[in-house]
């Protein structure tokens, strides 16, 4: 039997995940099958109908629409973002990014906080705060 906190995962899934003694098992099994991944996604992400394409540091990736960008980063790299040092409410700047819409140049970059921004189709993210470590993008496994 697994002992976990009585906090229901929801708006702060990372706190629930960190409090769970089974977190390594859960995270390790994410790649084992879509059923577990879908179960965790339903608590982690806002409802979405499709994946949209954005560019992060020159790499095109697909993320769930209708979600905050930091949750999309968590979708891409569950372990590093869940265990990262983020407040999830805009009080810190650990999730700061620099971005521009597709079709514009890096000279037109704007800063933003990933925890406050909704992802947009075609968004181009050119810089990430060093706290944002995404496996396969700016963090090697």
Image (cartoon, helix red, strand yellow):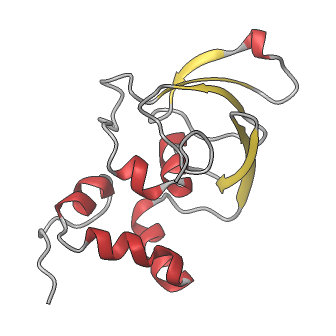
Q: Quadrant of the N terminus?
A: bottom left
The number of discs equals 0
Q: Quick one: which residue is furthest to the bottom in this view?
A: 1
Residue 34 locus on image (x, y percent): 56, 82
Q: Residue at (73%, 43%) from the top-left corner?
A: 54
Q: Residue at (30%, 69%) from the top-left corner?
A: 24
Compare residues 85 and 89 and report the one nearer the observer.
85
Left or right side of 45 for 49? right
Q: Quick one: which residue is furthest to the top in this view?
A: 107
Q: Is residue 126 above or below residue 80?
A: above
Residue 63 locus on image (x, y percent): 65, 54
Q: Is residue 127 above or below residue 64?
A: above
Residue 22 locus on image (x, y percent): 23, 74
Q: Quick one: which residue is furthest to the front in this view?
A: 141
Q: Residue at (43%, 78%) from the top-left corner?
A: 29
Residue 7 locus on image (x, y percent): 16, 64
Q: Is residue 63 above or below residue 119?
A: below
Left or right side of 34 for 17? left
Left or right side of 140 for 44? left
Q: Which picture quadrant has residue 79?
A: bottom left
């Amino acid at each position: 039997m697994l002992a976990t906190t009585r906090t229901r995962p929801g708006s702060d899934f990372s706190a629930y995940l960190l409090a769970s003694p089974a977190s390594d098992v859960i995270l390790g099994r994410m790649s084992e099958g879509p059923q577990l991944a879908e179960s965790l996604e339903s608590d982690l992400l806002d409802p979405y109908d499709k994946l949209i394409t954005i560019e992060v540091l020159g790499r095109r990736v697909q993320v769930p629409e209708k979600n905050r960008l930091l949750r999309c980063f968590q979708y891409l790299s569950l372990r590093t973002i869940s265990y990262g040092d983020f407040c999830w409410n805009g009080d810190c700047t650990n999730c700061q990014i620099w971005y521009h819409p597709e079709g514009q140049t890096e000279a037109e970059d704007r800063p933003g906080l990933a925890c406050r921004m909704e992802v947009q189709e075609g968004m181009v993210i050119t810089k990430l705060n060093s706290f944002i470590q995404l496996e396969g993008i700016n963090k090697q496994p």
